[in-house]
Image (cartoon, rainbow, N blue to C red):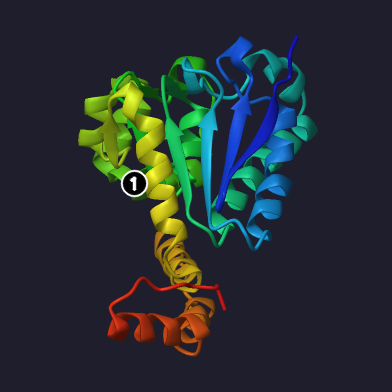
Amino acid sequence: MTTGTLKVEYDGPIGYVVLDNPARRNAISAAMWRALPALIVKLNNDPIIRCIVLRGAGEIAFAAGADISEFEQNRASDDSVQAYEAATRAAHRALEASSKPVIAQIQGFCLGGGLALALSCDLRYCADDSQFAIPAARLGIGYGIHGHRRLVATVGHANAREIMFSARRYDAPAALALGLVNRVLPVADLPGYVGTLAHELAANAPLTQAASKAAINALIEQAGDFADCEALIAQCMHSADYREGRTAFMAKRKPRFSGS
């Protein structure tokens, strides 16, 4: 039985995290859940990396969900359930807490835990052959509060109810209509589009992006204290990048942001 792995690929300021378990349609094993937070932190702390892209290996799936073949072991006792759920929460939080934009590049199956992982990314772009579903209601498992929150924040409560209650599978146009993805591309165009967008994001001001991400996440989480967000916003106003942005605008040239 393969447990899958995570691979990292680099394209200048872009770090690609690849879910690599093609024998199981990139199903996310417990080992992969546990490895993801440290990998995201490493990319987040790399000053060269300005944007992170999450994708599946091959052309069949982004991720067909959590690896159900491990459930008997990982959900055999209360302790094992708690450990497994803590690992998945840490993986989601790592993507959400990264100060850098995170893009989900989706082709093929994006189901269950795979869709939950995509929802923890900031942006989602999919190929026109993609399929989406959360089949929890057909498996008899409870879907976590955090996953529900991200789903509701993305598609609204009415659409979230349909997705969860029906366990229905949606094609790419339906996913776009629901708001699950930002854009649908032909299969052949998806990698190029995401790569171009990632480089576009990488050229923008990192401190501004980090402040906006923190503010949006705080609003989604309905946090009562926005002091951390206000501090990040203030940091932008006193940054070298703000001075560079003004100078570049007046000189009618592209800014060169340093993240400081």
Which residue is more in the foreground, 165 or 236?
Answer: 236
Which residue is more in the foreground, 62 or 239?
Answer: 239
Along the horizontal axis of the image, is 58 left or right of 174?
right
Q: Position of residue 83 (x, y in %)?
A: 75, 37
Q: Quadrant of the image for the N terminus?
A: top right
* Extreme-bottom residue of the structure: 238
Dot 1 amino acid type: Thr
- Crowd rating for badge 1 (residues with CA inside 10 Å; few <14, some 14–19, many 20+): some
| Count of numbered tags | 1
Which secondary structure, mark 1?
helix
Which residue is more in the foreground, 33 or 25?
Answer: 25
Residue visible at 76% across and 19% down in the picture: 73
Up/down of 45 relative to 190, above or below? below
Along the horizontal axis of the image, is 122 left or right of 79?
left
State the residue position of label 1.
154
Q: Position of residue 45 (x, y in %)?
A: 68, 61
Up/down of 50 relative to 123, above or below? below
User: Looking at the rendering, which quadrant does residue 182 occupy?
Assistant: top left
User: Looking at the rendering, which quadrant does residue 129 occupy?
Assistant: top left
